[in-house]
């Protein structure tokens, strides 16, 4: 294998592994804020126990997220040096901003979140939880801006051998190593055509990941009849969050697809398996791309794609035939990953709203009903849904951008480090495979242990300093007086 | 501000971030280097919990430093990271083991489990310190660059005697810093033992430091010329030695915090010395000095430097304020509780 494919495999592998964790931090972060807010408001020990328990789960995912995140920041330079030189003037500032505005906030206040329970008062602890959650969201903001600039570059011009080139200039293979993108307009870079749509879509996907993790573990306790009160309260909070997020995800996804249609038509054509530019373009529910015959065999809704793109079945949708074949993304992969993501997204809406329906009908906590138990089992496995959808969504976005590393400007093959050899990348790839397999096994083991051990029982609150207990008693007094 | 000055400002700011990293994560790595020298589980837990709440915030200085280097001097970032490929991959491996070992170690009470992560923590810390030192040694000595700034010397050339010596010096420096930090965070018998360690770690560091300075004159003769042009560097050097000597004095008087501050001062002075020696070069090319990367030919545009400068002005004071508050909240001796590692 050559250095390009190895470098791509390594980056894909390390970023995929990393991306199991930040969505959990972002989603769980919001849930921790909600739980602690409810605790502060009601003074009920059960919310304290919930916050404590989910904080422990949060701590575990956060540690691996940090450890695997540094790898990615290094990899731009180690494996993609030509890319780094080309985009440094633009891409680097987003990464640096992420460090200053997000990582410091997150990791600093995490200390209080994890270890501050008896060092600070409840309000300051709540503030720290909010800051950790905010920091996690900020990091999403900056990294999505940076990635979106690679999808839809804006606010820059190209400099070739120190000379400013006219707008629309695309360096050729000989020029690319002497060219760089330099910034014109910071705000145009930040608000590039896809950044806000993709940010919304990504963050909501993270919320789903956190919500369904809590849902899954809570459903497991309900099935086992353990920690029932804890599980009910956790499930309620997470289910509402999941129901809202899943619907929102439909909206942000539609908005994102709309942007792809405008800004990256080749990606859209690959997502939908549309070879021929046409009116009355069909939308596929699922299928198989026949690359020989250049057609998709599967279940389709005629005219639907045209309708979604332009509001009418007469709308002409650009197909892959509008692009030279060397500019096509890998069609089969993009098509399949995109459709898996859509199918899971729809299923998550169904699962979450079925739960709301059961709750409304008073059936949600009827653990003796076999159908409800079946539903709990679905919930236990639902945690995989957002994870797979998040991953396949990113495959769609990143593979759909190929063969470009910066869309329309620089090819992935041009971004490699010139001095790194295939053997070196192979060595590091083997190293990462080994370390990450070990980490993943230990992570699963420790998570299972945490789940088996469970939260501390509802009635006896975890050791709280006297000042906290007093404050909580006052709160309870106020709440009952008000009630 | 003049564009030329802005390049210098960014050289200093990137330097400040890496100095912050050395000063803060330096003691974490040092604690790791000393970790296996205590045998009792309780003592090892005390070590881990001394850095428990702060180590990952400290590591962020490296992440942000890397980001700032990427943004302000992309050519340096690309050259160093791709040129030191295997070394940086090993560094990543070491940092990952260090991080997860802290998190995982105390989750189970089995002897082999704790021993395994203890070794992971310690080797990860020692390995990280060593590789950071090796990288700095190569920068100081100069590496072979082509006309586009690519490193063409090969992996083995990075493992030269001078770089390896700087690698070992860095381990001893961080171990000294870590032992001083631990004195501040411990009490009783363990603290008394650590106080004796401090005197030893200082001795070992000074031994390596002196050899390093002699070796510099042999292996990096161009630094002699720089010294001739900038004789006041010797004053920084002298001040540095004095600050190190102050540490046992403060410890003897029982001023643990002053001793730690003194050690931090030593780290700052060392990094200042490093920065002032290489400035305005960032990666010196040897044997073709005309291919060197400096703060001008390796820089981003003036516009990006301005944008980043504003981001730093907005962000850094806030970061410093809450970082200081968090250190203040977690001041004092380590108390092991159920939430501890």
Image: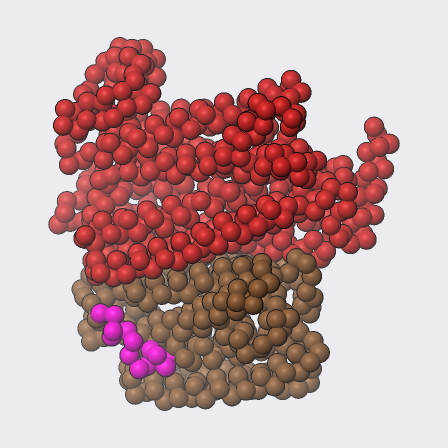
Chain colours: A red, B brown
Residue at 55 percent of width and 27 percent of height: A374
Q: Main secondary structure of the magenta part?
A: helix
Instruction: Answer left or right for B242 relative to B283.
Output: right
Number of numbered tags placed on the structure image: 0
Quarter occupied by residue A417? bottom left
Q: Nearer the viewer, residue A247 or B162?
A: A247
Toward the viewer: B237 or A297? Answer: A297
Q: Is residue A74 left or right of residue A385?
A: left
- Can residue B128 be seen at all in this image of the molecule? yes
Where is residue A175 drawn, in percent x and y? 15, 49
- Asked if residue B213 is positioned above or below residue A122 in the image, the reply reads below
Q: Along the line of sight, which residue is nearer the eye, B228 or B183?
A: B183
Q: Is residue B88 magenta?
A: no
**Splitting the image into 4 quarters, where does residue A283 fall?**
top left
Residue in the picture at 29% in, 63% down: B85
Residue, x 55% and y 47% (percent of image)? A448
Q: Is residue B339 left or right of residue B147?
A: right
Residue B97 location in percent, x, y?
45, 63
**Nearest to the observer: residue A124 or residue B51:** B51
Classify B312 as above or below B11: above
Q: Residue B29, can we see it?
A: no
State which region is magenta: B154-166
| Quadrant of the drawing holding the C terminus of chain B | bottom right
Residue A140 horizontal/vertical position (percent): 46, 42
Residue at 27%, 48% in the rendered image? A8
Relative to A214, say whether A433 is above or below: below
Quarter of the image with the N terminus of chain B in it: bottom left
| Residue A177 position within the rendered picture, expressed as x and y whole percent measured from the top left | 19, 53
């Amino acid at each position: 294998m050559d250095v390009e494919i190895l470098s791509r495999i390594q980056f894909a592998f390390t970023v995929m592994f990393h991306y199991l964790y930040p969505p959990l931090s972002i989603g769980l972060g919001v849930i921790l804020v909600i739980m602690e807010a409810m605790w502060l408001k009601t003074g009920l020990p059960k919310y304290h126990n919930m916050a404590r328990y989910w904080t422990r789960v949060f701590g575990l995912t956060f540690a691996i997220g940090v450890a695997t995140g540094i790898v990615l920041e290094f990899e731009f330079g180690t494996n993609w040096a030509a890319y780094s030189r080309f985009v440094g003037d633009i891409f680097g500032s987003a990464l640096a901003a992420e460090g200053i505005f997000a990582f410091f906030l997150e990791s600093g206040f995490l200390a209080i979140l994890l270890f501050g329970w008896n060092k600070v008062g409840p309000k300051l602890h709540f503030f720290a939880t909010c800051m950790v959650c905010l920091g996690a969201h900020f990091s999403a903001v900056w990294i999505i801006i940076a990635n979106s600039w690679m999808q839809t570059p804006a606010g820059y011009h190209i400099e070739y051998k120190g000379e400013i080139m006219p707008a629309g200039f695309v360096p050729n293979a000989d020029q690319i190593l002497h060219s760089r993108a330099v910034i014109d307009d910071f705000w145009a870079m930040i608000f590039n055509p896809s950044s806000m749509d993709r940010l919304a879509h990504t963050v909501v996907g993270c919320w789903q990941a956190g919500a369904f993790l809590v849902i899954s573990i809570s459903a497991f306790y309900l099935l086992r009849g353990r920690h029932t009160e804890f599980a009910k309260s956790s499930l309620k909070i997470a289910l509402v969050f999941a129901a809202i997020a899943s619907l929102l995800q439909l909206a942000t996804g539609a908005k994102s697809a709309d942007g792809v249609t405008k800004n990256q038509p080749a990606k859209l054509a690959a997502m939908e398996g549309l070879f021929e530019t046409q009116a009355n373009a069909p939308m596929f529910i699922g299928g198989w791309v026949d690359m020989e015959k250049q057609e998709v065999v599967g279940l389709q809704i005629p005219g639907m794609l045209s309708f979604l793109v332009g509001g009418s079945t007469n709308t002409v949708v650009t197909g892959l035939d509008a692009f030279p074949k060397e500019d096509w993304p890998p069609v089969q992969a993009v098509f399949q990953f995109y459709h898996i993501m859509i199918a899971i997204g729809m299923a998550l809406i169904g699962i979450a709203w079925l739960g709301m329906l059961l709750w409304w009908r008073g059936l949600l906590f009827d653990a003796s009903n076999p159908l409800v138990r079946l539903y709990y089992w679905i919930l236990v496995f639902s945690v995989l849904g957002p994870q797979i959808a998040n991953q396949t969504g990113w495959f769609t976005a990143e593979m759909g951008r190929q063969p470009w590393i910066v869309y329309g400007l620089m090819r992935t093959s041009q971004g490699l480090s010139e001095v790194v050899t295939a053997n070196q990348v192979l060595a590091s790839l083997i190293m990462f495979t080994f370390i990450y397999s070990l980490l993943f096994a230990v992570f699963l083991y420790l998570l299972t242990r945490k789940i088996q051990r469970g939260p501390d029982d509802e009635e006896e609150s975890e050791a709280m300093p006297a000042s906290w207990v007093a404050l909580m008693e006052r709160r309870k007094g106020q709440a009952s007086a008000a009630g | 501000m003049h564009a030329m000055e802005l390049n210098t400002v960014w050289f200093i700011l990137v330097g400040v971030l890496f100095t912050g990293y050395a000063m803060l994560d330096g003691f974490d790595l040092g604690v790791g280097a000393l970790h296996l020298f205590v045998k009792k589980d309780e003592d090892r837990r005390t070590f881990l919990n001394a850095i428990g709440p702060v180590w990952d915030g400290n590591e962020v200085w490296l992440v942000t430093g890397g980001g700032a280097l990427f943004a302000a001097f992309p050519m340096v970032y690309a050259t160093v990271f791709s040129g030191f490929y295997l070394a940086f991959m090993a560094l990543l491996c070491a940092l990952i083991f260090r991080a997860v070992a802290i998190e995982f170690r105390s989750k189970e009470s089995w002897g082999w489990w704790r021993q395994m992560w203890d070794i992971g923590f310690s080797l990860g810390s020692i390995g990280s310190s060593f590789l950071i030192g090796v990288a700095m040694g190569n920068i100081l000595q100069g590496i072979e660059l082509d006309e586009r700034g690519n490193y063409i010397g090969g992996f083995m050339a990075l493992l030269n005697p001078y770089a390896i010596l700087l690698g070992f010096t860095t381990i001893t420096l961080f171990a000294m810093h870590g032992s001083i930090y631990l004195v501040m965070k411990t009490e009783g018998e363990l603290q008394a033992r650590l106080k004796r360690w401090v005197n030893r770690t200082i001795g070992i560091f000074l031994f390596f430091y002196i050899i390093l300075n002699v070796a510099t004159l042999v292996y990096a003769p161009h630094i002699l010329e720089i010294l001739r042009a900038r004789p006041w560097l010797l004053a920084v050097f002298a001040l540095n030695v004095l600050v190190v000597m102050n540490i046992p004095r403060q410890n003897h008087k029982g001023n643990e915090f002053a001793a730690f501050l003194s050690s931090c001062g030593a780290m700052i002075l060392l990094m200042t010395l490093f920065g002032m020696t290489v400035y305005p070069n960032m990666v010196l090319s040897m044997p073709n000095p005309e291919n060197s990367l400096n703060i001008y030919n390796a820089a981003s545009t003036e516009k990006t430097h301005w944008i980043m400068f504003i981001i730093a002005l907005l962000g850094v004071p806030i970061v410093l304020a809450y970082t200081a508050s968090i250190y203040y909240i977690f001041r004092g001796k380590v108390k092991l509780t159920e939430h501890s590692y």
